[in-house]
Image (cartoon, rainbow, N blue to C red):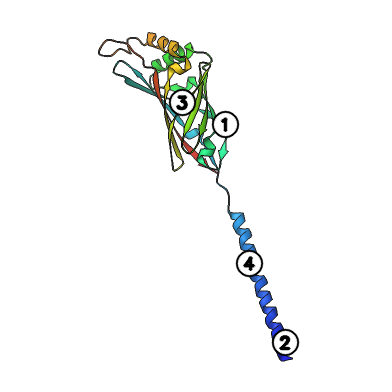
Amino acid sequence: MKKITLALIAITLISFTSCKDEKKETTKEVETTEVKKETSYMLNPAETEVQWTAYKTTDKKPVSGVFKIINFDKKMGATPIEALNGLEFSIPVSSLFSKNVERDEKLITSFFGAMLNTELLKGKIAMTEESCEITITMNDNMHVIPFKFDIKDNKVMFKGIMNLEDWDALGALESLNKVCFDLHKGEDGVSKTWTDVEIVVKTTLMKH
């Protein structure tokens, strides 16, 4: 009888311990599930800058500036690439800034002002792990620019070349060159404004 009683006690203890351990495992699993959260990314407009570099004179002297305002859709993604792919933006031309008030006024009135519907420059990013293309709408023309890009520690940099003839903007370029004729002369006495403009975009992705 004692043997039977001891056996029953042993079985009861084993069952209780197993249930207790199983309960601990279940509790631990629930806690882990609750703590784990998916990270998402979104571009930070406040830490985004669009830099441009145009060129003048036969020697191709650079003239640089920025657009101080760039507006983005609020788009999130599980990865930086996913957050950027498909992102649409607009840039007010009036936010152009080159540290020269007279130059800024000429660019806004004689260059952008000589085009159609250029109060805003509009764009959309198409991006994969291997490539990036940005469609830009200007002068009622839409064209795609391939961009090189680098992503490091949530910092992103895009770099590409905009050829103004792709937006039928050579007339606007001629208009600008007329008002800047003497300023765009080099040592050879030739006044020249180049058709290619380098675009560099620097931004930061926020984690949520």
Q: Are marks 1 and 3 in contact (CB under 8 Å)?
A: no
Asked whether 174 or 95 is in front, the reply is: 174
Under mark 3, the amino acid is: Ile
Alpha carbon distance from label 3 to label 4: 57 Å
Alpha carbon distance from label 4 to label 2: 29 Å
Asked whether 167 or 182 is in front, the reply is: 167
| Labelled disc at residue 64 | none
Circle 2 residues within 10 Å: few <14, some 14–19, many ≥20: few
Q: Secondary structure at mark 1?
A: loop
Report the quarter where the C terminus lies: top right
Alpha carbon distance from label 1 to label 2: 73 Å
Q: Residue at x 46, y 26 (%)?
A: 145
| Labelled disc at residue 24 | 4
First in residue order: circle 2 vs circle 3: 2
Name the residue beneath numbered marker 1: 73
First in residue order: circle 1 vs circle 2: 2
Mark whose residue sits in front, 1 or 2 = 2
Q: Are marks 1 and 2 in contact (CB under 8 Å)?
A: no
Q: Is residue 142 left or right of residue 12?
A: left
Q: Are marks 4 and 1 in contact (CB under 8 Å)?
A: no
Q: Secondary structure at mark 4?
A: helix
Q: Residue furthest front?
A: 130
Under mark 4, the amino acid is: Lys
First in residue order: circle 4 vs circle 2: 2
Rendered location of residue 119, percent (x, y): 52, 18
Rendered location of residue 23, percent (x, y): 66, 67
Circle 4 residues within 10 Å: few <14, some 14–19, many ≥20: few
Circle 1 residues within 10 Å: few <14, some 14–19, many ≥20: few
Under mark 2, the amino acid is: Thr
Q: Secondary structure at mark 3?
A: strand
